[in-house]
Image (cartoon, rainbow, N blue to C red):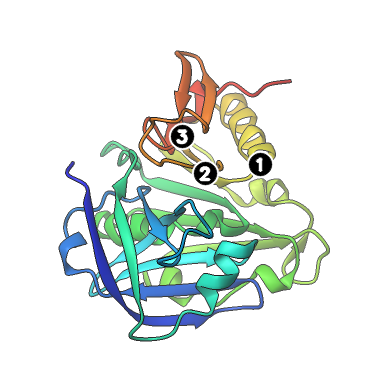
Amino acid sequence: MAKIQGVYKIIANQKLSSKFFKLSIEAKSFRGKIQPGQFVHVKINDRLDPFFRRPFCIHRVKRNLEILYEVVGRGTEELSQKKKSEHLNILGPLGNGFTLPSRNIQQVVMIAGGIGVAPFLALTDILRKRKIRLVLLYGGRTKEYVFNMKAFKDNGCQIFISTDDGSYGVKGRVSGLFKKIRLDKSTYFYACGPKPMIKTVQEFSKENNIEGQASLEEIMACGVGTCLGCSIKTRQGYKTVCHDGPVFDLKDIVFEK
């Protein structure tokens, strides 16, 4: 798929919670060219500091390109200060996104940790048309990581939430929500979040003979597979998250001990 690079106008930069922002960008050229699970590389400003672009999962593409992001460092802090009508240099779509489940799948369970929820809205925009059961298990550290998920509900998702400290939803890790799932052979998993969470999902899927995919979070520099800085170990050897991923088959990911 051809990559697009251009300068696009910011439509809105909305604060959803104390941790999360949603950036909406006028980007007509991206419509119809995005696969859920892909990402874009954003140049934060026109200066050399910060030098590297920042990767962001594509949250949704309808009228505008939407990015859900967490303020975690200098780059995202500066991004959170951007105003309507300012412009950003964007490269994308990058990477390989989610493969849609086969037609015999009747239930899709999405498991997200923190900002790992970002790519799933675009996925549900497509899966809602199949009239299958959509379940989202979401885990955050505290209630500050929980935001209004109306768009997921509008797409027919049944949502279960946990927080590490119990300040919202069920107390504990998102794995504590696995018991909410009615498992059968027509179930399929999608996961995105920290590696320990992905490893737990991988183990759970193996125990229950459920297929699935995972979108991995990794620090990236080039975003196109050249620098090899985001390489991970898989059953087929080392692969880059930015170019070969960020989506991989759950069972193919090898976690170092």
Identify the residue shown where x is 55% and y is 79%: 16
Q: Foreground mark, 2 or 3? A: 3
Furthest toward the right, the residue is 165
Does dot 3 land on a helix, a strand or a loop? loop
Looking at the picture, how far across and down is residue 93, in whole percent?
28, 50
- Circle 1: residue type: Met
Q: Residues within 10 Å of mark 3 (few under 14, many from 20)?
A: many
Q: Image height check: is 249 above or below 21?
A: above
Looking at the picture, how far across and down is residue 176, in whole percent?
73, 49
- Which residue was labeled with disc 2? 191
Does dot 1 land on a helix, a strand or a loop? helix
Q: How far apart are the alpha carbons under marks 2 and 3?
A: 15 Å
Does dot 2 land on a helix, a strand or a loop? strand
| Residue 57 horizontal side relative to residue 17, left or right | left
Q: Can residue 211 be seen here? A: no
Q: Earlier in the sequence, mark 3 or mark 1?
A: 1
Q: Dividing the image into 4 quarters, which one contains the C terminus? A: top right
- Which residue was labeled with disc 3? 241
Q: How far apart are the alpha carbons under marks 2 and 1?
A: 9 Å
User: 244 or 200: nearer the eye?
Assistant: 244
Q: How far apart are the alpha carbons under marks 3 and 1?
A: 17 Å
User: 128 or 31: nearer the eye?
Assistant: 31
| Residue 38 horizontal side relative to residue 175, left or right | left
- Which residue was labeled with disc 1? 197
Looking at the picture, how far across and down is residue 116, in whole percent?
55, 53
Q: Quadrant of residue 8?
A: bottom left
Q: Are marks 2 and 3 in contact (CB under 8 Å)?
A: no
Q: Can residue 114 be seen here? A: yes
Q: Residues within 10 Å of mark 1 (few under 14, many from 20)?
A: some
Marker disc for residue 48: none
Q: Residues within 10 Å of mark 2 (few under 14, many from 20)?
A: many
Q: Quadrant of residue 244?
A: top left
